[in-house]
Image: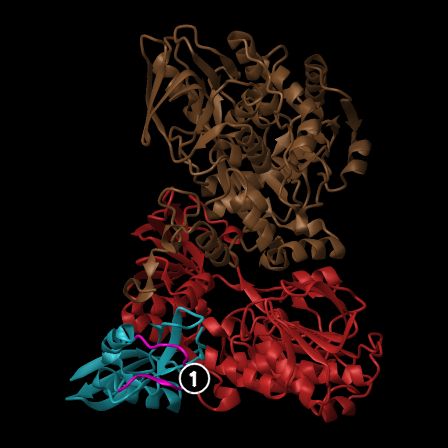
Chain colours: A brown, B red, C cyan
Amino acid sequence: MIYDVVIIGAGVTGSAVARELSRYSDLNVCVLEKGEDVCSGTSKANSAIIHAGFDAAEGSLMAKLNVEGNEMMDDLARDLDIPFKRNGSLVVCIHKEELDGLKDLYNRGIANGVKDLKILSKEEVLEMEPNLSDNVEGALYAPTGGIVCPFILNIAMAENANVNGVDFFFNTEVQTLKSDEDNIWHLRTNNGEYKTRYVINAAGVYADKFHNMVADKKIHITPRRGDYCLLDHEMGDFVSHTIFPQPTKLGKGVLVSPTVHGNLIVGPTAIDIEDKEATATTAAGISDLMAKAGMHVKNLPIGRKVITSFAGLRAHEDNHEFIINWVDEAPGFFDCAGIESPGLTSSPAIGRMVGRMFKEKLGLKEKADWIGTRKGIVETKNLSIEERNELIKKNPAYGTIVCRCESITEGEILDAIHRPLGARSLDGVKRRVRAGMGRCQAGFCSPRTMEIINRELGIPMEEITKSGGRSNIVLERTKGGED
Amino acid sequence: MLKYDIVIIGGGPAGLAAAVSARKSGTEKILILERDHELGGILNQCIHNGFGLHTFKEELTGPEYAYRFMEQVFEEKIEYKLNTMVMDISPERVVTAMNREDGMFQIEAGAVILAMGCRERPRGALNIPGYRPSGIFSAGTAQRLVNIEGYMPGREVVILGSGDIGLIMARRMTLEGAKVKVVAELMPYSGGLKRNIVQCLDDFGIPLKLSHTVVDIEGKEHLSAVTIAEVGSDGKPIPGTEERYTCDTLLLSCGLIPENELSRSTGVEMNPVTNGPIVNESLETSIPGVFACGNVLHVHDLVDFVSQEAALAGENASAFVKNGCKDISDEKGIEIKAVEGARYTVPSTVNTERMGDLLTVRFRVGAVFQDSYVSVYFDDERVMHIKKKIMAPGEMEQVILKKSALEEHAGLKTITVKIEKE
Amino acid sequence: METRELTCIGCPMGCQITVELDGGEVKSVKGNTCQKGDVYARKEVTNPTRIVTSTVVISGGDKPRLSVKTANDIPKDKIFDVMKDIDAAHPSAPVKIGDVIVENVAGTGVNVIATRNISAV
């Protein structure tokens, strides 16, 4: 079979593009993902912020898509049932001599089309955020800034694409690709060859690799590591807005923000590295983080309240600009490269832009029966007793708590496993329903979640993984392998 | 709404002992709520022996010890619900719980006994740098996998932390055919019992490295190696002391934390040292009619003391119900303070009218003390001065207060427990 | 003359005890600070014993593993021989606390017994 479009990468970009392409009839689309699940690369480890759009350079594609993506988020969150909140963001100035920098940011934001920006005095900002440092001199307030669940954003778009006919192939790594005389692309993978008329390169930190296989004009993507600390629920209301320092040339700096699930996130650092898989945190990175986080807020008990630390890799392209376009010398090859922050925010706009370009080029027609909405997994935590009991009557699994830190029921885990593109690993379950994301970090619930995966999917216990590949949890049966 | 005289949250050693004692004190309607599929709590996975020397004058394994109490619960026909998670306890003692059969339901409780136990400090809280592969377990999770479910996490093991569960697991993994390469302990002393160091490590030639910690974790998918290094007196790793161990399993035994999510949301006042509720002589928390005992109150090293403490909580909860659930929170009584070497005391206050003839005050010390004294002061007067050859943070200490002695000191405001050199 | 170094397990002190032996006979015990240490050291160098606890595979029960222990202590140098027999045992549910699972384990004269109940399913 020859696909019309193969998308490389099921991260937030690939999934957004897949969803947009799923609107069109007579278009066979598939997504090839080297991980075992959607959202298993850069999209899973970031600040989970919906940026307002004042950072990116005026006139850049990055600025345009950031602001558009931000504006699209309310409708998208409603349609696809994605946890999202416009909590507003504050860029905080702690040096009087840098107050002009706030003004520059403000002006850039206005030029980029960011709405409702305001510069606040020391008194105004301290009233909004009493836990800010006493050294605060002023702040730029962007009420359109928000926070989102990055996993569900990614997963929801992929699920919705899947429901609308897009195939997803996991554990499928594209090794080489070339086009033949009929302009059919042949993608060699570890799971055989895929043929397609069009290729969309949404490979995150590997986007340069695929681009450079087919293009004369090379690009270079640096994995820019960011270390993060996630703090306990107890700290979830330490600040109510997303607190940024003033930006530097390495990025937006170490932010402190509530998450949509009531934790507090601190990060990221910005360390350019070579290895595109090196998501290891370092002692230096974490201590750098702790030092920087303390500059803009006061008495942050990061050391005592951290529940996990992790690192993500931003796909930093040398010119710090999104590359979203056809590659001229490789007909049928389309790049979505250099998608680093504000990539998460921009993803719906990137999807829409790519969709429109494909529609135009291929003369696509919209499906009459396209399903634009998705119902998320019920969050039982927020239900009343009556609502819970109704659910438990229908399915008693909703009466069993599996993850006690986050109060996640077996019913929610079953839904995570059995819905389209369902979870097959512990991390897959965790990203969908947060089981294992709480303060005990899966110590209690992982054996129980494994039992559920084992029972529901028939995957032997020894083969159940944390996140695919060789990340199996247990090795073998005790006593020589007998059951 | 269901109504019970006493609702006990947790069917582990504390909950079981509290239930039996409350019944023996004459309370009829008692309900134990247990989230697991069987009673016994963590003891079910503690298959090693060494439990019960104080209580039964013999050494039992964890499941055997638990069963001694379970039998009494069965004999006394005390009600319990398994697979039942308590979701909320209101300050008015309405307990909201949930299971598959009953759905979500509420119980009006005359008294509530918190007996939820404790949990292990996870990797995240330790903030160890490196990758986040599979193969890293808290020692207790590994213990459950090996002993209950019958699965081996791996074959080559490094253990961080020399708490008793870590030591016990070093032996368990060895007996099951794994190679335990090293146990690293951040502190200059082990928090585990000497007996466990000898019989779980020395017996099998497993090295214990004090003042060492894990500084790097390798393996993008599955754990492949860890690096440990010596730490200086500032607690920071000393460059140049790194040693790399290839391994597929890292077990963490780095401390236990009382599990007080429920207590906190109820509004129970907490002790920041123990991470458990602040209680009076009756083991009653700041919320009238809500009692606490066992590891949810403060982490114990011996289950015998958990059972004793829980029995007291059961008795007092029973008395509270018999007295018509009267709020007596304004009659706090005498404050008990821990200073100079003593980190905390349980209880924190004592009202002589409500105490028995004797009151056991349990505490822990903050460092290793040799040839020192446990002193108890009634206001400024030293009334007890007990020589101890050795005291260590890993072993709970106690002093026993006599009601008669307290009554002799009319107007006594503060009892102070401290460690003195002479 | 042979010397053996031991850590006393009597209390948190963990005295480092030196025992001098001559042809298996204890000549002196040094380093202990109380009588408990002396008793412990003499036993530990002449006849060290341990209780072994483990699990066995069980069929037909509501659990895949049954916890067991040696009913009495066994010689320390027999631990792995005892484990071999334990690993080979394969009882069927139901089992009650105290049921003998392995008789005369590794020729020690000691039985391995169940330490929990497992009901049949």
Check the picture and name the quadrant holding the C terminus of chain A.
bottom left
- Residue that appears at 39% across and 55% down: A461
Nearest the viewer among B96 and B61 is B96
Residue A400, position as x, y percentages in the image: 60, 59
Q: In which quarter of the image is residue B196?
A: bottom left
Please determine whether, in this image, residue A158 is positioned above or below residue C12.
above
Q: Where is residue A189 in the image (x, y as percent from the top left)?
A: 33, 28
Q: Which amino acid does label 1 sit on?
A: Ile
Horizontal arrangement in the rendering, residue C109 relative to residue A163 (left or right)? left
Report the magenta stretch's main SS: loop
Q: Where, by quadrant of the figure, is residue C117 drawn?
A: bottom left
The image shows residue B353 at horizontal and vertical percentages of 80, 87
- Image quarter hosting the N terminus of chain A: top left
**Which residue is depicted at the point 52% across and 59% down?**
A444
Which chain letter matches label 1? C
- Is C91 covered by the magenta stretch? yes
Taking the magenta stretch, the answer to whether it contains residue A268 is: no
Examine the rendering and report whether any part of residue A93 can be seen. Answer: no
Between residue B111 and residue B190, name the one nearer to us.
B111
Give neighbour class at mark 1: few <14, some 14-19, many 20+ (Cα, 10 Å).
Answer: some
Q: Mark 1 points at which residue?
A: C97
Residue at the image point whose x is 20% and y is 87% from the top: C21
Q: What element carries label 1?
A: loop
Residue B65's place in the image compared with A124, above or below, is below
Q: What segment carries the magenta color?
A: C90-103
Q: In which quarter of the image is residue B113?
A: bottom right
User: Does B289 sit above or below residue A136?
Assistant: below
| Residue at (39, 9) in percent of width and height | A330
Query: Depth check: B361 or A318 in front?
Result: A318
